[in-house]
Amino acid sequence: MIKYHNILFCTDFSEDANIAFHHAIDLAKKYNAALHILHIPHSSYSYCRNIVDEHVPEGTEGEAFFSEEIEKRAMEALKKEYDKKMGDFGNYTYAVRGGSPDIEIIRYAKKHNIDLIVMGALGKSELDRIEHGSTVANVSKYAHCHVTAIRNPAKQFILPGKMY
């Protein structure tokens, strides 16, 4: 039987992330698991790899431009967005990291013994996905645990004669 102890929900505050949140908290309640809510603020200076390079030391590249002020504002945004949505669920923590999102999500997941990562299928920045690749795809490919990408039903991709 599958049992999750630590669930990581990753957010960029997009519509898709907000839909994924409802799945993450439902799973955390169902499995009596801890819910970790992680945000990696967008950086105009982010490095990207075609593969997740976990050998890049922490504190380099994107993290070099990550300040206490950015972390404070991001933490306030997390609390504003999710505190009320928690209801009576109390087993959660917020985290903010700087750097390349796919790498930092995987680092966080390993460090905190995450069993399941829940993410929105699409995020805020379509341009980033084109330039740097899909965060969800990279996390899914390289994570040590299960990854669930939640699609927004309103954004179904339709081809003539087929629905995807």
Image (spheres, rainbow, N blue to C red):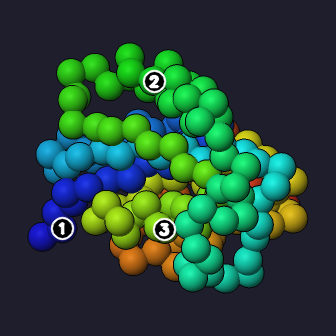
What residue would you read off at disc 1?
A: 2
Indicate whether 74 appears above or below 30: above
Label 2 sits on residue: 79
Indicate the quadrant containing the C terminus: top left, top right, bottom left or bottom right: bottom right
Kindly identify the residue that appears in the image at 66 percent across and 46 percent down: 66
Measured in 3D between alpha carbons, the distance from the residue under mark 2 to the one under mark 3, in whole angstroms, is: 23 Å
The image position of residue 151, as x and y in percent, is: 58, 51
- SS type, badge 2: helix
Question: Of circles 1 and 2, which is in front?
Answer: 2
**Element type at mark 1:** loop
Please provide percent x and percent y for residue 41.
65, 43
| Image quarter of the N terminus | bottom left
Callout 2 crowding tier (Cα within 10 Å): few <14, some 14–19, many ≥20: few
Circle 3 crowding by C-alpha within 10 Å: few under 14, some 14–19, many from 20? many
Query: Marks 1 and 2, how far apart in space?
Result: 30 Å
Q: Secondary structure at mark 3?
A: helix
Q: Residue at x 48, y 68 (%)?
A: 106
Q: Amino acid at mark 3?
A: Ile
Tell me the amino acid under the disc marked 2.
Answer: Lys
| Lower sequence index among marks 1 and 3 | 1
Asked if residue 86 shows in the view, the reply is yes
Which residue is disc 3 drawn over?
106
Q: Does residue 120 sit above or below 92 in this rendering?
A: below
* Residue 31 percent coordinates (x, y): 17, 50
Instruction: Give neighbour class at mark 1: few <14, some 14-19, many 20+ (Cα, 10 Å).
Output: few
Three-letter code for the amino acid on which mark 1 is drawn: Ile
**Which label's residue is closer to the chain start, 2 or 3?**
2
1 and 2 marks in contact (CB < 8 Å): no
**Mark closest to the chain's N terminus, 1 or 2:** 1
